[in-house]
Amino acid sequence: MDEQAQVARGVKSGAMLTALLIGAFVAFLNENLLTNAFPGLMKEFNIAASTIQWLSTGYMLVIGVLVPVTALLQQWFTTRQMFMTAMALFLAGTCLCAVSPGFGILLLGRIVQACGTGLLLPLMMNTILALYPPERRGAAMGLMGLVIMIAPVIGPALSGLIIDTLHWRWLFYMVIPVALFSIFYAFMHVKNVTELTKPKVDFLSIVLSTAGFGCVTYGFSQSNIWSQMEGYGTLALGSLFLILLVWRQLTIKVPLIDLQVFRYPLFSLVAILVVALMMVLFATTTLLPIYMQDVMQWTAFATGLLLMPGCILNAIMMPLSGKLFDRFGPRFVIVPGLFLIAISLWLFTGIDSSTTQGSILIKHVLLFLGMSFVVMPAQTTGLNQLPRHLIPHGTAIYNTLQQIAGGIGIALFIGIMSSGANRYLHHSLDPTAMNERTQSLVSGLQTVFWIEFIVALLILALGWFIKKSPEHH
């Protein structure tokens, strides 16, 4: 057993894991609180869906850019220093959001929050992988997934209740004491479990990563990307930066992101699956509240309550899927989950202005039940194939792809929805009529779900190639 493993085994893993999970809970709770507020914020700030989505897209973009840097930072700073810094940034961003006078400051606060969350996510995964042996990682990762998914369980309904009875600023006011408690608890229990090697920092890689992912995400956010040169140009520029980033990582001695992880086929396969899944998941969870409040005319609280059962079932099934993964292997868990996701998205293609609450509930439950059997088991499968020295880079890449794909998914599918709605109104006899505007939104959403269903079928085909592989200890 190497020195790092001995240190990790000497730490009280239960208390350490609890501290990390409290931080994860408060970070994910705040992210999930805001989505249900989008329709109200659009009206208050008089902005379109393509603008308001930056509160989520910008958040994920910052996290995605920071995550690769976190793999490097964890070799410069202790686990304790990293966690305390992450939660302090998150707390500062939350306070800024709470007092923001307009959309610009609110977006700035979200970016500061994202800086803290971007440091926290890979730190959590790396710490769990250091604390637990491979045969116990499935259950530990499932527990992390459980706590993370509690946030979307209570988030939509809680935010709906606050929006309907108080003010959206209370979405941030109430998070502040929880963040303070997290910092206090971590101060008492978080210890270092990583080896500090202090490698050289390659600032050019950081610049290329930031510019590349930023340009690509912005390009996809253009609602008429398929007809506007600005969208094409930004995508091309972002792709160039990313190509240069890859070239840079392959040619320098100490890369920011060690691309050797892609030599392991299961890791690469799971990376593709994670990208597609996150695009679908984050886009769907962002668009559903808009549909339910603008088309169905439900209140924010009713919207949150309807989305709660699927999230509750997801949270319950996360630990079970981890145990099933440990016992039977990945294919037994992942393929059925992908099948449920595909069925859910196929059912969503038929939504319209007369869709019932029960129908939406069933579709949403199926989607989140499927996700509970796929996300954590798939990532654990990919990471288990890596040797120990590549695990920090593997977790960084997975988290980067997850956040960037989520941001791109929201931007891309909101753009597709807007384009579909505009296309419907262009052929409408009375495009200013309220009923026609509602139908245009439905038309755009149906287009989105058909595309997501096709993506789900492709992911299902990939899932058959996932199998258990020998772990590196």
Image: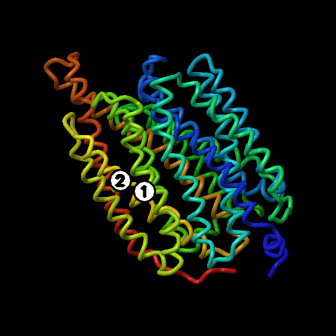
Q: Residue at x 70, y 49 (%)?
A: 119
| Number of disc labels | 2
Q: Where is mark 2, residue-wise?
A: 365
On screen, 320 above or below 88?
below
The mark nearer the N terminus, 1 or 2, is 1
Quadrant hosting residue 382: bottom right
The quarter of the displayed image where residue 384 is located: bottom right
Q: Which residue is mark 1?
A: 313
Q: Is residue 120 left or right of residue 227?
A: right
The quarter of the rendered structure image containing the N terminus is: bottom right
In the rendering, at what x and y percent does residue 296 appear? 27, 31
Per the image, label 2 sits on a secondary structure element best described as helix
For the residue carrying disc 1, how many other residues have a C-alpha within 10 Å: few (<14), some (14-19), or many (20+)? some
Q: Position of residue 127 (x, y in %)?
A: 72, 63
What amino acid is labelled 2 in the image? Answer: Val
Disc 1 marks which amino acid?
Answer: Leu
Element on which disc 1 rests: helix
Q: Residue 308: give x, y in percent of width and height.
A: 42, 46
| In this rendering, position of residue 214 left or right of residue 258 | left
Q: Give residue 429's mark.
A: none
At horizontal 24% and vertical 47% (from top left) the residue drawn is 349
Q: CA distance from mark 1 to mark 2?
A: 7 Å
At 50% from the left and 66% from the top, the residue drawn is 270
Position above or below: 346 against 432: below
- Location of residue 191 in the rendering, given as x and y in whole percent from the top left corner: 83, 59
Q: Are marks 1 and 2 in contact (CB under 8 Å)?
A: yes
Residue 268 shows in the view:
yes
Looking at the image, which residue is at 38% across and 63% down? 459
Asked if residue 434 is positioned above or below residue 348 in the image, the reply reads above
Drawn side of residue 471 relative to residue 367, left or right: right
